[in-house]
Image (cartoon, grey):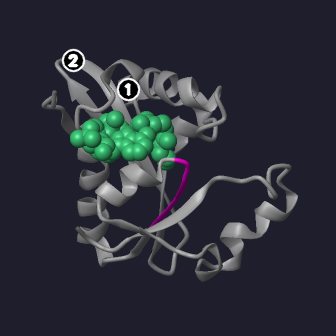
Amino acid sequence: MKTTASVRKAAPEDIESIYRIISSYSEEGVLLSRSIEDINVNLNNFLVAEVGRAIVGVVTFYDYGDRLKEVRSLAVDKNQLRRGIGSALLNALISELNRANAPRIFVLTYAAGFFKKNGFSIIDMDTLPEKIWKDCANCPRQDSCNEVALEYTGT
Ligand SMILES: CC(C)(COP(=O)(O)OP(=O)(O)OC[C@H]1O[C@@H](n2cnc3c(N)ncnc32)[C@H](O)[C@@H]1OP(=O)(O)O)[C@@H](O)C(=O)NCCC(=O)NCCS
């Protein structure tokens, strides 16, 4: 069943909810962890989804400059999955980024199916600038990594 969630820019009072939702996935190794301080410093780049007065999802991005942006920390409350909230957040973020300067938008993720449904296509990691994948060389999972790179190509 779809839920009507409203998506808006995050405000300081959302920080704890954002932290809680991201942590529920970073503890499983699905997302990178984010500290309260890190969220606070970058709050301007976060969007949240709200149902009633409850924060049920979050998304942000990293700006590499050169019109290259990475979708980061997209997470939906585990009790609210498969109701369209992740798609609503992602679409709102893409609209916002496209309003700015039509950048190249990519993601590194284990949830490739979700991103494909939302207009992303799988790309070769090598097509991304070296600064993005150079850290892979130091990662213990480099030989068994299931993360996939996808780029927004439109629906
Ligand atoms: C990925 C995630 C954000 C999806 O949120 P959601 O609100 O459940 O997504 P939606 O309801 O908008 O899903 C839209 C469609 O994507 C597909 N989809 C959703 N989650 C999926 C998943 N984990 N794997 C594959 N396909 C998925 C489904 O086909 C779904 O449509 P359907 O329910 O009609 O079949 C959520 O599962 C999540 O928080 N995952 C953990 C964190 C993560 O992996 N984030 C992405 C990396 S930044």
Name which residue lies at 36% across and 59% down. 116
| Number of residues whose C-alpha sits closer than 10 Å to that of mark 1, classed few (under 14), some (14–19) or many (20 or more) | some
Q: Name the residue carrying label 2.
A: 53
Query: Residue 12, how many percent across, how many down?
Result: 39, 29
Q: Mark number for residue 14?
A: 1
| Number of residues whose C-alpha sits closer than 10 Å to that of mark 2, classed few (under 14), some (14–19) or many (20 or more) | few
Name which residue lies at 60% across and 38% down. 30
Q: In this view, does 46 lie above or below 139?
A: above
Numbered disc 2: secondary structure: loop
The disc, 1 or 2, on the residue closer to the chain's N-terminal end is 1
Question: If the picture is divided into quarters, which one holds ligand 1?
Answer: top left
Name which residue lies at 33% across and 74% down. 153
Which residue type does callout 2 highlight?
A: Arg
Query: Residue 50, how many percent across, how many down?
Result: 24, 28
109 in the magenta segment: yes
Which residue type does callout 1 highlight?
A: Asp
